[in-house]
Amino acid sequence: MQIAVLGVILCAIFIWASWAYNTRVTDSLVRTVAGTERVLTAADRGLVVADRGLSTALGAVNTIDGATRAMGERILDTNLAFWLLERTVGETLFPRVLAAQEVVTAVADTVIGINDTLEAANRLPFVEVPTLSNELGLVGGRLAAVRTRVDEIQAGIREVKERKIARPISIVTSRTGPILSDLDSALTSIDTTRTRINVNLSRLARLRVNLPRLIDLLSVVITLTMLWLIGTQSYVFLRAYENLAGRRVDWGGLRARLRRGGGEEEAAAEL
């Protein structure tokens, strides 16, 4: 009997808590989702900047590779070619690769933190928000390799210009191929991540709108479940009482007394 009474009290507490904290929990979750949307929007904007910079860098590498192959060994005979090559590498290629690497690294760190929030959201019923992969971490590694090869091209151009060494073409072209491959792979990964971010933004926006109804539904489910448990515990309490008393509860007599009591109250009210 004591366990049944305790069960009824606990169920009543759960019902009260499910509605007392309903608004507070809803507001907190809505703020969390809205904050996540803002962070993802900022990350997407950063990736747009990185995408543009790497696209420009990709064009610069194609220009460098094509011009170097077209000039061939004649590149040793003109300072103009060296000047254009140095300027393209130093002013177009290197700064954009460096900026993109910094942005991608920052966004990759952000994605790691956002995934915890997305996984927490997926624990809610009827919620499915895809988590983001750590693909940007690999992009950062590729861009670091690109930066190293760009440094090598710059050093090689200076060496060719100063010493007039043989085979100047291979110093550039042996590195432009891997750079093109890494830049193309990085752009593909950035586009894939942006697609996932936009999917997340769409689903988070729907979740933010539906959260109040979802929390209300959870409160209703908790209430109905607790009411069923209260009924069950009440039945257990009555059966335990009957076993201890050695007789069944006279429900008919109880109803009759209640009716008589109601009639007496009506008569007193008429008087």
Image: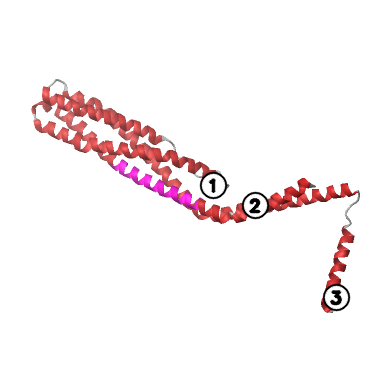
Q: CA distance from mark 3 to mark 1?
A: 59 Å
Horizontal side of 188 relative to 252 (left or right) equals left
Q: Main secondary structure of the magenta part?
A: helix
Magenta range is 29-52
Q: Which residue reaches farthest right?
A: 247
Q: Which mark is residue 267?
A: 3
Label 3 element class: helix
* Residue at 17%, 32% in the rendered image: 67
| Residue beneath disc 2 | 221
In the rendered structure, which disc, 3 or 2, sits on the residue that comes first in sequence?
2
Q: Which residue reaches farthest bottom?
A: 271
When asked about the image quadrant of residue 190, the answer is top left
Looking at the rendered structure, the kind of residue marked 3 is Ala
Q: Residues within 10 Å of mark 2 (few under 14, many from 20)?
A: some
Of the residues tagged 3 and 1, which is closer to the observer? 3
Res 130 seen here: no
Residue 46 within the magenta-colored segment of the rendering: yes
Q: Whole-percent x and y of residue 28? A: 51, 52
Horizontal side of 76 relative to 260 (left or right) equals left
* Residue at 89%, 52% in the rendered image: 248
| Residue beneath disc 1 | 127
In the rendered structure, which disc, 2 or 1, sits on the residue that comes first in sequence?
1
Looking at the rendered structure, the kind of residue marked 2 is Val
Looking at the rendered structure, the kind of residue marked 1 is Val
Label 1 element class: loop
In the rendered structure, which disc, 3 or 1, sits on the residue that comes first in sequence?
1
